[in-house]
Amino acid sequence: MDTERSHQPHTDLRLERISKRFDDLLVINDLSLEVYKGELCCLLGPSGCGKTTTLKIIAGFLEHEEGSVYLAEREITDIPPQERDVGMVFQNYALFPHLSVFDNVAYGLRRRGWSLKDIREKVADMLDLVQLSGYGKRRIQELSGGQQQRIALARALVIEPELLLLDEPLSNLDARLRVRMRSEIRRIQRALDITTIYVTHDQEEAMSIADRIVILHQGVIEQIGTPREIYEKPLNRFVADFIGRVNLLQGRVEGPHLYLLGGTFLIPKRGWPEGKVTCAVRPERIRLGPEGSGFLTALIEEATYTGSLVHYRLTAEEGARIHAELPSPEAVYEPGERVGLAWDATDIRLFPI
Ligand code: ATP
């Protein structure tokens, strides 16, 4: 029991009922959020949903009309940005181009009045952490995109902030470097055990790096959960549709029965909505078998081979389009064939229309 209690997450950042308007536009709508000590929490959502605005409110760069911000049990709502104990990395890194790598990283320490000896030691430690020891004398223009990104990270972390805010920190990098740098960020974030909020619109990035993901939509949190919870147990149609690929099929629930695509399915008692519903099922959860097997018959319209997987586009007998995905060795079916479809009752999610 005691061990369990000691592992209870401890809230580090708390947003309480935040609202923000730009003129008549309500951009953040009564948003509350708790981020735990040492976790990496991704804010994910479509363009314009309020991710950057939320980050700026936490950093203190933007005033908001309502609500409070707490960091390490201290209210910081009215505290200016430089006194908030927050480090930030922006999309464009915002490094000082006329200063050397050393001076960029040393900047926050100088402002805090550190001695030159201590600054040298600390900057050397940080450059070591981001694996750029020996780069201190370089000009910023002499660095690659990935190296600049690491220096921006070192500059934000050198002051040992309570909270690290990252706003699309990898969007200037090419795809391969992005993947490498995101594991770098994760390594450093874990090594320092620093509470981090990471804004991205790239769901794969969020899924691979986050402890928890916050799905934002029009200034409202649609769901907070681990990547697995968000993908496998979306709370609503928006989240199911936004994360990954999904089939959204129209059906009807009456008691323990789901009427869908001309078939009747028994659904386990789980508080599903009654009446018209959208049934969400992931393409990889659909099983294909010979015609006559499974619950439904469908015609294969298209099969796309992608190496490890084959994507199938199918039409069910009553006209609905369905996507399925099979590992290549199991994908023995060809366009023009009729197949039987099946899935497990636990693999569907039902949402009211
Ligand atoms: P993106 O992924 O495109 O960066 P985002 O989720 O970060 O989007 P925000 O930058 O937070 O979105 O913007 C949220 C909304 O607020 C948008 O509709 C945007 O047009 C609006 N907005 C942001 N900044 C301002 C501003 N300074 N003045 C007026 N409207 C603004």
Image (cartoon, rainbow, N blue to C red):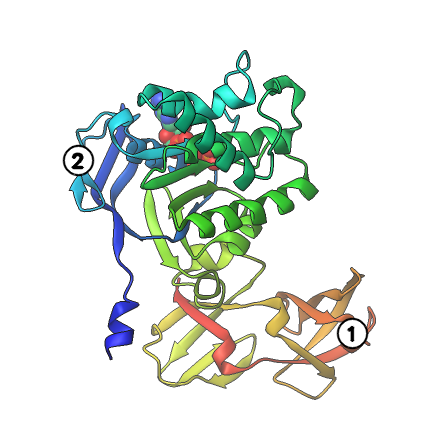
**Residue at the (43%, 32%) spot, across then down:** 156
Could you say where residue 191 lies in the image, as x and y percent from the top left?
A: 46, 51
- Tag 2, which secondary structure? strand
**Type of the residue with mark 1:** Ala
**Residue at the (56%, 74%) spot, across then down:** 261
Front position in the image: 226 or 70: 70
**Residue at the (50%, 56%) spot, across then down:** 241
Q: Quadrant of residue 80?
A: top left
Could you say where residue 225 lies in the image, as x and y percent from the top left?
A: 39, 60
Q: Residues within 10 Å of mark 2 (few under 14, many from 20)?
A: some
Query: Which mark identifies residue 331?
Result: 1
Relative to 321, 226 lies left or right: left
- Tag 1, which secondary structure? loop
**Type of the residue with mark 2:** Glu
Look at discs 1 and 2 and give the one toward the viewer.
Answer: 2
Front position in the image: 258 or 17: 17
Could you say where residue 148 lies in the image, as x and y percent from the top left?
A: 58, 28
